[in-house]
Image (tube, rainbow, N blue to C red):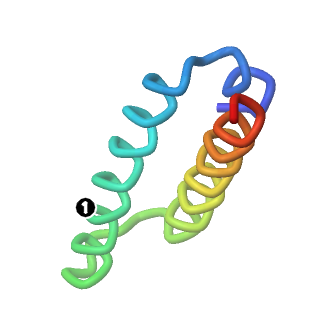
Amino acid sequence: MKIKELRELTVDELSARRNELKQEIVNLRIQSQVGQLENPSRVKIMRREVARIETLISARRLASA
């Protein structure tokens, strides 16, 4: 997802998306260890998206406080 799309989501939706991505990262790491990972750069892309989501969540919490 692009940052513009992420900004439109609520905090609950962002948290759910973050959990989904973290689970998928775990699955990709398992595939990497087994040797079945087709696109290794996908892990990097997902980690960056998790970081974007966490940044948005923390910014919204600071803004509401």
In the image, what residue type sits under mark 1? Asn
**Quadrant holding the C terminus:** top right
Q: For label 1, count other residues whose C-alpha is less than 10 Å away and answer few (under 14), some (14-19) or many (20+).
A: few
Left or right of residue 62, residue 22 in this image: left
Location of mark 1 (residue): 27
Residue situated in front as seen by the camera: 11 or 28: 11
* Name of the residue lying farthest toward the bottom: 33
Left or right of residue 53, residue 11 in this image: left
| Location of residue 5 in the rendering, given as x and y in whole percent from the top left corner | 71, 21
**Quadrant holding the N terminus:** top right
Count of marks placed on residues: 1
| Location of residue 23 in the rendering, given as x and y in whole percent from the top left corner | 28, 53
Residue situated in front as seen by the camera: 8 or 29: 8
Quadrant of residue 27 in the image? bottom left
Eyeballing the image, is 41 above or below 52?
Answer: below
* Name of the residue lying farthest toward the front: 65
Residue shown at 73% from the left, 24% from the top: 7
| Location of residue 22 in the rendering, given as x and y in whole percent from the top left corner | 37, 55
Residue situated in front as seen by the camera: 32 or 58: 58
| Location of residue 54 in the rendering, given as x and y in whole percent from the top left corner | 60, 50
Eyeballing the image, is 38 above or below 12?
Answer: below
Residue shown at 56% from the left, 52% from the top: 50
Residue shown at 44% from the left, 25% from the top: 12
